[in-house]
Image: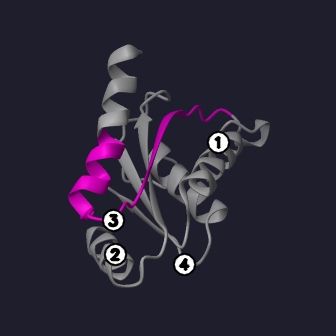
Amino acid sequence: ISQVLHSEVGRCRRYNNPLSVIMIWLNDASGRGLSAPDSLSAPAILGQLLAEQTRWADAIGRWSKEQFLLVLPETGLRAAELLSEKIRAAATAPERGDMVFDLRFSTSEWQRGDDARTLLARAEASLQSMAQSA
C-alpha cells in the first residue's frame, strides 16, 4: 500500500489530480485478537467489507496491526468523508451478526507540496487525537 500511495502522490504532483486517504483504526472490540490469521478475525472481515465498499481504482492495505489505509485516487476530501460514513454504516449493519467493530476514521486530502509522509501525518494526527479524547 505504501508503494501505491507514493505512486499516486507522484501522479498528483505531475497532474494536480485530487487524492485522498482514509486511515481506519480498528479496535479489538470482539476480543478475538487483531493478529488472528483466520478468515473470521475482525481484520479479515473488515478487509472484505472495505473491498465491497470501494472502487476498483482504490487501494486498500493494512498499515499496522490496528490500522488500515485506503488510497483514493481522483477523490476529494468530501467524497472520502462520504465513503467513511458508508463504510461505518456497512460495518454496523445488522447483517454483520455478532461481529462488533470499533472503528475510527480519519481522512486527509493531498495538497500541493505534500509528499506521502505529510499526507499520512495529517490522517494519523487526527486518529491519535481521537484516541486520546476517547
- Choose between 96 and 1: the one closer to the eye: 1
The x and y percentages for residue 122 are: 32, 44
Q: CA distance from mark 2 to mark 3?
A: 18 Å
Residue at far right of view: 94
Residue at 31% of width from left, 41% of height from top?
124
Q: CA distance from mark 4 to mark 3?
A: 22 Å
Reading the image, the residue beneath label 1 is 91
Q: Is residue 35 visible?
A: no
Task: Mark 3 vs mark 1: give the one in front.
Answer: 3
Indicate the amino acid at tag 1: Ala
Q: Secondary structure at mark 4?
A: loop
The answer to which of marks 3 and 1 sits earlier in the sequence is 1
Reading the image, the residue beneath label 4 is 57
Image: magenta residue range: 98-124
Q: Secondary structure at mark 2?
A: helix
- Choose between 107 and 134: the one closer to the eye: 107
